Image (tube, rainbow, N blue to C red):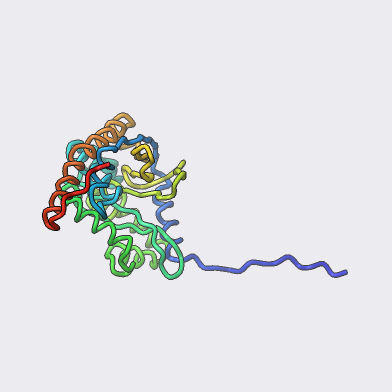
Amino acid sequence: MNEAKPARGRFRRLSLQRRLMADLMAASFRTPIIAGERLLRVGEAARARRSFPKAPGWTAIILKAFAIVSTRRPLLRQVRVSFPFPHLYEHPVSVATVLIEREWRGEGGVFFDQIVAPETMPLAELDIVIRGLRDRPVESVGGFRRMLRFTKYPLPLRRLLWWLGLRGSGYLHARYFGTFSVNSISLPRARMVQTTTPITISLIHMPLEPSDQIRLSAAFDHRVLDGMEVGRALGEVEAVINREIVAELRAMAAERSRASGVAPAPAR
């Protein structure tokens, strides 16, 4: 009786998406990351969003709120640089790196691009930029094209470029990787329990809960920031959302109602 031979798999080359993630993990390896979390009470903002259709998304809201807080807390705009000796570099404005899951050539992957000084942008414009990162063709986004081009380089050159961009120059770090990043986990009842990042502080937010609360996690480089500083910053993010962001949402709703001649829907 002949025994069936076990099935054998097949060789598959790493796609650019997998190579990019491998480069990101390698760059994050030596960063001592601490993670914290806060449950944001955003009832006022949630009600303001319900007053008109196609309101700005929560990623835009949280991104702008954190950037506003960063104008008041310069520590949140600092990055650690290794060359020529370990020191901190403080960027004059916030640079937000937005992480987006996209499909490219039949395979999913994480892409990212930067938004400079989001604290100065109208919320509606910021939301359009983020939606564009989700919806525009991958090749039409400058940051995505740069990522794909660099990931085609040989491994030693890629590692050198990542080191130069992250550790060799504070300006390059802020310009190409941001002073902070924002990622959205849009799956209900799912939570990120562990993460790593080469960026000073990375925010991950969950969907709005029925109680009008949002779970916001922050993974941060403990060489640059301490836990109490991050905890206070997340508390200020909640306050900014329910104050400045709510005021902007209400102004947007009023402006749209004036333009359309229709009274805004009452908040529920």
Among all residues in the image, which is located at the extreme top? 228
Q: Residue at 49%, 65% (x, y): give it.
A: 14
Q: Hey, which quadrant is residue 134 in on the image?
A: bottom left
Among all residues in the image, which is located at the extreme right? 1
**On-image quarter of the N terminus:** bottom right
Is residue 145 among what the camera can see?
yes
What is the total number of numbered labels drawn onto the structure image?
0
The percent coordinates of residue 50 (x first, y second) are 27, 47
The percent coordinates of residue 184 (x first, y second) are 36, 49
In this rendering, is residue 144 above or below 178?
below
In this rendering, is residue 76 above or below 181?
above
Is residue 85 among what the camera can see?
no
The percent coordinates of residue 253 (x first, y second) are 18, 49
- Depth check: give the residue in front, 36 or 52: 52
Q: Residue at 33%, 31% (x, y): give it.
A: 227
**On-image quarter of the C terminus:** top left
The percent coordinates of residue 220 (x first, y second) are 35, 39
Q: Residue at 37%, 35% (x, y): give it.
A: 37
Q: Is residue 54 left or right of residue 34?
A: left
